[in-house]
Image (spheres, helix red, strand yellow):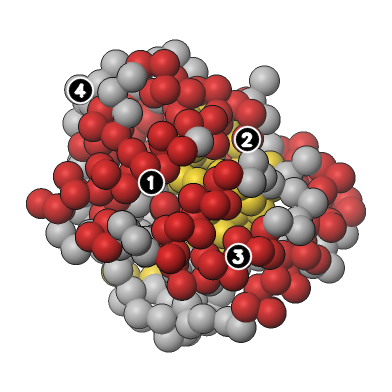
Amino acid sequence: MPDPSIFTVTSPKITVPAGACDCHTHLFGPAQRYSMKRDRVYTPADALPADSKTMLATLGLERVVLVQASVYGTDNRCLIDGLKVFGQAARGVAVISPDITDKELKDLHAVGVRGVRINIASGHDKPVAEIAATMQLLAERVSPFGWHLQLFVRPHFLPELEHISADMSVDIVIDHMGLVPAASYRGNVCFSALLSMLDSGRVWVKASGAYRVVEEQKEWGNVAPMAQALIERRPDRIVWGSDWPHPPKHGLDAIDHGNILPFRSLDTGLLLNLLADWSPDPEILKRILVSNPARLSGFD
């Protein structure tokens, strides 16, 4: 039974341009078909391609980027099957190990994968040196395909990543505004590092996850100054994502069982509406929703 909260989507108040893309969504299930890794940190409900299509149609979005969920580890079957359902309207971000074969990479590329995710924030921290080594190994594998690395990390990693990313042979994408708290972004060394990374011309930032950088929904409006600072800095390097179906809050310790945690009950349409406050200029909005995703994810 799907979580009803994922259907909480109202039509946006903003004018969504043709070809607009949601650059960060997930698919889950059916649970009977896709087994989750034993050491996952939560157990989600199902959120199926048909549910995703309903959300996108309500918002007026024509394209989508499907991001491999942490609960599946490097088993990308759910992602691959979802990409096949969406066809040319979708691109994917997979999770892979450095020893993946060339044939597997080619197969992923053929189905629409254009990036690889490194997820640190969903679990306990790892040493920076280990993250850097993983980034380097994965960059070497995916560089021939023109893919990017997508990083989901907590903000204290950003100053170190500023230097590490400068030596990468591929573009870097930072999830959810680097998780920098909106209430303390001014003068924050982590946010300063994020801006410097944008200046490098090799880094992209997802203006997404507003609910991840404040405590409560009533504070969503407080995200605007920080999001505006990112957009004003490099409007050609910002993309937007809904983070649908809004994965649940969870602990950092691995589990091998557990009850289903419900998705966060959020209105995805309201999250898209935030862009009107962050970027009222229709031309900038078109960049964020259309042309930037097309360049980053290789939409024809």
Q: CA distance from mark 3 to mark 1?
A: 19 Å
Q: CA distance from mark 2 to mark 4?
A: 26 Å
Q: Which numbered circle lies on residue 13?
A: 4
Q: Which numbered circle lies on residue 274?
A: none
Looking at the image, which residue sits at the far right? 102
Residue depth check, mark 3 versus mark 4: number of the one nearer the observer: 3
User: Under tag 3, what secondary structure?
Assistant: helix
> Which residue: 79% across, 51% down?
169
> Which residue: 57% across, 52% down?
197
Q: Which numbered circle lies on residue 161?
A: 3
Residue 7 image point, x, y percent: 25, 41
The mark that comes first in sequence, 1 or 4, is 4
Residue 95 image point, x, y percent: 65, 60
Q: CA distance from mark 3 to mark 4?
A: 36 Å
Residue beneath label 1, please?
A: 208
The mark that comes first in sequence, 1 or 2, is 1
Please say if 123 is above or below 241.
below
Q: Which numbered circle lies on residue 296?
A: 2
Residue 29 image point, x, y percent: 46, 55
The mark that comes first in sequence, 2 or 4, is 4
